[in-house]
Image (cartoon, rainbow, N blue to C red):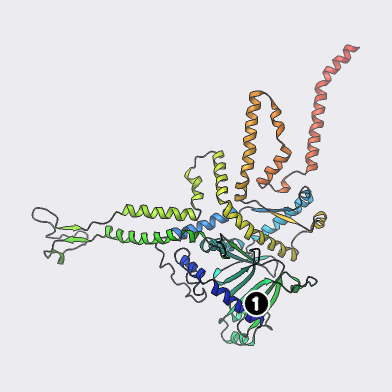
Amino acid sequence: MSEVADIFNRVSRLKSDRGSWESHWEEIAEVVLPRYKDSFIGQAYVNTKGDKRTQKMFDATAALGLERFASVMESMLVPRNQKWHFLKASDEALNRDRETRLWFDAVTDILFKQRYTPKANYASQQNEVFMGLGAFGTGVMFLDQMAEGGIRYKANHLGGIYFAENHQGIVDTVYREFHLTARQILQKFDNERVPESIHKIAEKTPEQTFEIVHCVKPNMERDEARSDFKGMEFKSIYVTKEGNSILEEGGYNTFPYVVSRYVTAPGEIYGRSPAMTALPSIKTLNEQKKTVLKQGHRVVDPVLLMHDDGIANTFSMRPGAANAGGVSAEGRALVQTMPTGNLSAGFEMMNQEREVINDVFLVNLFQILTDSPQMTATEVLERTREKGMLLSPTMGRQQTEALSPMIERELDILMRQGLLPPMPRQLLEAEGEFEIQYDSPLSRAQRAEEATGLFRSLEFATNYANVSGDPSVFDYFNMDEAIPELMRINAVPERWKRADKEIKGIRQGRQEQAQQQQAIEAAPAQAQLIGAAK
């Protein structure tokens, strides 16, 4: 069997294995993310462009909740208005070296500059990944280098992504199924490898589409002695069914697809999402909304009950109309409205379901501060710490499974493009081993406990010293260790800090100045002693 046929057979098997997933995703798309409707059972490129896809949505709470969920994930994990991570050496001894710290600061600056350039398109694509994560439980991002230098980010639709894990549960194989027009194929690939049939079609109908599969998998035939793609860790191959052709072969040193899951069930490789958890409430709310709309229509435009005496034939509902015979000679109404149900009960039941949906999509977590705007700074800090505790299990997985592989991929691309500064000698000798330290609002909320613990202890020590007059209680605090750690918690850049040698010089100068001041103050007394001795 040819390699092309093997790839398409593997895609076919993976596709058949996840049929139940696709029906589940399709049901969620209909009521939570309607722009994805009909893109799992069918394919997005087959659907009529611009058609209405909200026919099964009667309430927008879940759709709005999903958008807010994506905003929560972005603001807590990857806020675009601040640096949400930095790098440091794995060896703590190297982290005490200022040159090493400055190098890691410079690399971090370059990373964020490249990531948030308009051409990179990171911010919008990351938001798409978070939307997919909240709706379907799995988000996929593709990172590749641009020919002119830099990184290009692309969120991939889950409907065309099939992946497999290695023995450690890490995704190391991805098949991406997509379509390109004949003209796009000639633009992207070496024309000599493009089948002649596509060349001919491009001349007559250049917008005709063809199915393409991009396969990335471990390079089982890797030759480490080679510097080309055959010496890389992962093999990359683009194939098309048209002529069973290989359009491009290549490789990657780092896995280019970042696959993140919200949570996974035992034995499953695709993630489960907040929308799946909230689906019963979403469907219930939709049915309740339909019922309330019908009942509300009856209340606003009521059904009339009339005596069967022929008045119905001439009864007018126009404003200002006079209907003779609508009352008896005694003034008793002969026309009445039909009693309707209790709308307030319907609204209360709907609000209960909305609360559940908002809880699942983490919306209520961000109502803490708005619900209590008069809180003190200490109370705000405590609420922030609690929020970090609640979000930690969910977002910790995203840091491990999505952001860390993404940063490693970014560094690999930038290093191979020569966009990183030369590595310091001592770090080079340590083979450049580094760690990622997350500094997002979530990470700070998690570390806020340490800072608040120090401040509480200092406050207690200060009160004790004022009452007892004994300042020895402050001997327990090692401020030379605490202050630098607090600066790290508060994301103070390394270049804003003084070097250790500079701090020692300042302290030595202060000590010498104090000694000189003591000598000046002691001079009159010494002069009196000398005079008395004479």
Question: Mark 1: few, some, or many residues within 10 Å (few <14, many ≥20)?
Answer: many
The quadrant of the picture occupied by the N terminus is bottom right
Which residue is label 1 attached to?
238
Q: How many marks?
A: 1
Three-letter amino acid code at the position of disc 1:
Tyr
Which is more toward the observer, 477 or 421? 477
Residue 352 is left or right of residue 79, and the answer is left
What is the secondary structure assignment of the residue under circle 1?
A: strand
Q: Measuring from the top left, give residue 476's x and y in whole percent.
A: 71, 33
- Residue projecting furthest to the left: 329
**In this picture, is 5 found above or below 257?**
below
Q: Measuring from the top left, give residue 147's x and y in whole percent.
A: 69, 70
Residue 470 is left or right of residue 58, and the answer is right
Which is more toward the observer, 422 or 431? 431
The quadrant of the picture occupied by the C terminus is top right
Which is more toward the observer, 331 or 252? 252
The quadrant where residue 103 appears = bottom right
- Residue projecting furthest to the right: 534
The structure residue drawn at horizontal position 77% and vertical position 44%, both measured from the top left corner, is: 499
Q: Measuring from the top left, give residue 197's x and y in whole percent.
A: 61, 87
**In this picture, is 253 found above or below 501?**
below
Residue 148 visible in image: yes
**In this picture, is 529 found above or below 386?**
above
